[in-house]
Image: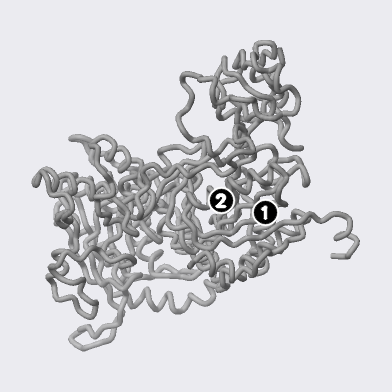
């Protein structure tokens, strides 16, 4: 990108890899950053995290899309949370790349659907780097490959500041999706691994960071290198 | 009075679903305080109040979808007792926490940043009953509250040492048995798996410290994994048991010489593939022979209705297709009107669409007889379960070259077993064997040209 573009207003975005973190802890971190973003204390944030097994349900979630009782999930070591994001029920777990963009859309476009489309585009662009052709599926937000969902999206917006985000299956054990009807759709899921991609988490994060930067006109700044952050958080 | 309207949240958005009112009619609200939530395409958005006052009217209920610009509620600015003081700035009201709305939602202040003045920016985590080992499920929390259990005394055996319902139950039964017993460890939970396993000489795996009260080591692999059946699996399970309860299953097996068919297939398969784009298998030959035999013995193409026999004039053949985690039986309609090419095309098409889950509902209904090709996975013969409400199913085993006696000499022939499972309520052994014999005769004396 030419320097003029840089000068003419790429916004700054901080990238943080939280590594493996429990859903509720990541949520607290996220809400804290969202609050600080709303008060203009920090620039846009792009968080990456990997959750232990957890099933979450959005505001519009339907109980019938949980195929297992809370008790059964508990026995299987899966926590359960109701959240304030859009969308139905979803699963997060090891091997999945969860991204939480905390963006102030007033500095981009005041368009919530436009935001979701741009998140999809960013994921599709990142997948393209690994030779995977991700697609949109009219009426079913997310990123799909050959009729299988590889990334789910669920967003919350308050005063134009976004939270929650997307979950991209990297090396996810897809068996865990059997506990739910993902997003309320009886359609199969897939992962980068299942699609034959053998890339490290760090490589996929880099690809995502790059594609988000391009789609949202961001200059992504990394306070600490990804690997070190991940190490710190895993200690 | 100020109208609160459904806002425009983006260029392409023409309507929104009001998912939740964050205030009730009669509640006081500050300017910019989150008032309601709307949902559009996987995005939940909090909408701030356009003014300070009292939410005097709610015009659109939760769950309703309305066009942009529609008034969803009304705010009475004069009705706000405190509205005068803080005025514009949009700063939080001086003491919204004091004004006690009697039915205020308990807890959960963390999410709403509004009342957090400069004072304590980081709200304390709602730590109330979290166990050291991790989050507690609502069920465990509820039980602990109901039975007044001190969770610190309960040993968790769930993932990462989490406390599960079972842990609470065994804790409670232990407490019941030994009224006092405080500091001592509660006895090992009875229903848990480790004890019996420890008794078995575990090969290679380091035994979990046998009979001592060794708690389950953190990070140890669980010995079982529990997961719910998919909807499809549940349907298959019901269907199979229902069939076994309904029909009197008997299986008869015939050995068939497939040499002629094998030669026919060998001769045609390359040209077939290049001409039609899919491979020629044994299955359309078996299907074709079955269709002809069904025409000769229509009782095999019937079903039972109470004490009546329902004969089907159409021959609709269900073909069992194995899926990744299940099984489906799409139907070739009017299979008697198709030749080998037509049958093979239908089989290839239905199987492909079954695997990509693109079958239409009517393509898995209306079968009058089924065929299962267990030979494709190497089985020689099996005893299939009847696909209700049909009365028989034909299974075809793997075609293998074998030495057989032909005209008192030993020859190498391509042999296979045909297994017919029939419902003895309607069909007797003699008829079943005449039918299978007919299928066998057609296959052994194959004369129809393929191309």
Q: CA distance from mark 2 to mark 1?
A: 11 Å
Residue on which the image places disc 2? A29
Let me know if marks 2 and 1 both belong to one chain. yes
Residue at image point 19% right, 57% down: B192
Looking at the image, residue A207 lies above or below residue B203: above
Pointer 2 chain? A
Measured from the top left, where is residue B234 in percent x and y? Answer: 31, 48
Tag nearer the camera, 2 or 1: 2
Please tell me in which quadrant of the rendered image residue A143 appears. Answer: bottom right
Q: Position of residue B36 (x, y in %)?
A: 60, 28
Q: Residue furthest right?
A: A4
Dot 1: within a 10 Å radius of its alpha carbon, few (fewer than 14), some, or many (20 or more) residues?
A: many
| x then y, percent, for residue B422 | 20, 53
Please name whichever residue, B316 or A172, is drawn nearer the observer in this view of the structure.
Answer: A172
Neighbourhood count class around disc 2 (C-alpha, 10 Å): few under 14, some 14–19, many 20 upward: some
Can you say whether A121 is above or below B94 in the image? below
Whether residue B349 is visible here, answered yes or no, is no
Left or right? Give the position of B189 relative to A73: left
Q: Is residue A214 left or right of residue B328?
A: right
- Under tag 1, what secondary structure? strand
Q: Is residue A225 above or below residue B182?
A: below
Task: Give the secondary structure at mark 2.
Answer: helix
**Nearest to the observer: residue A75 or residue B148:** B148
Colouring method of the image: one colour
Mark 1 — on which chain does it sit? A
The quadrant of the image that shows the N terminus of chain A is: bottom right
Q: Which residue is mark 1?
A: A45
């Amino acid at each position: 990108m030419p320097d003029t573009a840089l000068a003419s207003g790429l916004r700054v975005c901080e990238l943080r890899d939280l590594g493996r973190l429990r859903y509720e802890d990541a949520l607290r971190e996220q809400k804290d950053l969202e609050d600080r973003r709303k008060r203009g204390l920090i620039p846009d944030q792009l968080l990456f995290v990997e959750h232990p097994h957890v099933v979450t349900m959005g505001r519009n979630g339907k109980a019938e899309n949980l195929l297992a009782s809370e008790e059964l999930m508990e026995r299987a070591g899966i926590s359960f949370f109701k959240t304030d994001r859009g969308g139905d029920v979803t699963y997060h777990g090891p091997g999945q790349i969860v991204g939480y963009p905390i963006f102030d859309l007033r500095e981009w476009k005041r368009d919530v659907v436009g935001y979701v489309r741009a998140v999809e585009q960013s994921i599709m662009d990142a997948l393209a780097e690994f030779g995977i052709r991700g697609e949109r599926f009219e009426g079913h937000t997310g990123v799909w490959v050959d009729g299988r969902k590889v990334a789910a999206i669920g967003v919350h917006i308050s005063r134009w500041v976004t939270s929650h985000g997307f979950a991209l299956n990297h090396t996810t054990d897809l068996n865990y999706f059997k506990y739910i009807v993902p997003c309320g759709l009886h359609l199969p899921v897939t992962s980068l691994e299942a699609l034959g991609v053998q890339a490290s988490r760090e490589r996929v994060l880099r690809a995502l960071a790059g594609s988000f930067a391009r789609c949202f006109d961001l200059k992504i700044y990394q306070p600490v290198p990804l690997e070190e952050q991940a190490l710190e958080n895993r200690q | 009075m100020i109208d609160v309207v459904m806002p425009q949240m983006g260029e392409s958005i023409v309507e929104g679903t009001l998912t939740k009112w964050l205030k009730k009619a009669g509640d006081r609200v500050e300017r910019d305080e989150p008032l309601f939530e709307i949902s559009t395409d996987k995005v939940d958005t909090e909408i701030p109040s356009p003014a300070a006052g009292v939410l005097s009217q709610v015009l659109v209920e939760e769950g309703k979808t309305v066009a942009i610009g529609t008034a969803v509620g009304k705010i009475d600015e004069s009705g706000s007792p405190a509205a005068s003081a803080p005025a514009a700035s949009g700063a939080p009201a001086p003491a919204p926490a004091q004004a006690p709305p009697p039915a205020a939602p308990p807890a959960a202040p963390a999410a709403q940043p509004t009342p957090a003045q400069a004072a304590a920016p980081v709200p304390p985590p709602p730590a109330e009953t979290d166990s050291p080992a991790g989050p507690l499920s609502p069920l465990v929390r509820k039980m602990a509250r109901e039975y007044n259990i001190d969770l610190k005394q309960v040993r968790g055996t769930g993932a990462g040492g989490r406390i599960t319902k079972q842990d609470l139950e065994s804790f409670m039964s232990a407490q019941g048995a030994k009224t006092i017993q405080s500091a001592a460890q509660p006895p090992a939970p009875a229903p848990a798996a480790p004890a019996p396993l420890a008794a078995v000489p575990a090969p290679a795996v380091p035994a979990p410290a046998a009979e001592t009260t060794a708690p389950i080591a953190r990070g140890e692999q669980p010995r079982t994994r529990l997961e719910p059946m998919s909807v499809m699996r549940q349907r298959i399970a019901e269907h199979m048991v229902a069939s076994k309860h309904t029909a009197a299953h008997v299986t008869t097996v015939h050995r068939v010489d497939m040499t002629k068919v094998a030669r026919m297939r060998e001769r045609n398969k390359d040209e077939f593939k290049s001409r039609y784009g899919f491979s020629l298998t044994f299955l359309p030959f078996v299907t074709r022979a079955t269709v002809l035999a069904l025409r000769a013995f229509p009782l095999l193409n019937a079903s039972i209705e109470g004490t009546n026999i329902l004969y089907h004039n159409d021959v609709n053949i269900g073909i069992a297709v194995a899926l990744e985690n299940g099984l489906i039986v799409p139907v070739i309609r009017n299979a008697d009107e198709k030749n080998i090419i037509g049958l093979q095309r239908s089989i290839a098409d239905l199987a492909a669409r079954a695997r990509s889950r693109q079958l239409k509902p009517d393509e898995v209904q209306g079968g009058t007889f089924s065929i299962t090709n267990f030979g494709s996975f190497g089985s020689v013969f099996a005893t299939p379960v009847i696909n209700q409400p049909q009365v028989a199913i034909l299974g075809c085993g793997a075609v293998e070259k074998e030495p057989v006696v032909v005209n008192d000499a030993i020859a190498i022939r391509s042999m296979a077993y045909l297994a017919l499972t029939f419902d003895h309520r309607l069909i007797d052994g003699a008829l079943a064997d005449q039918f299978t014999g007919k299928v066998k005769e057609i296959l052994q004396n194959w004369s129809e040209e393929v191309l």
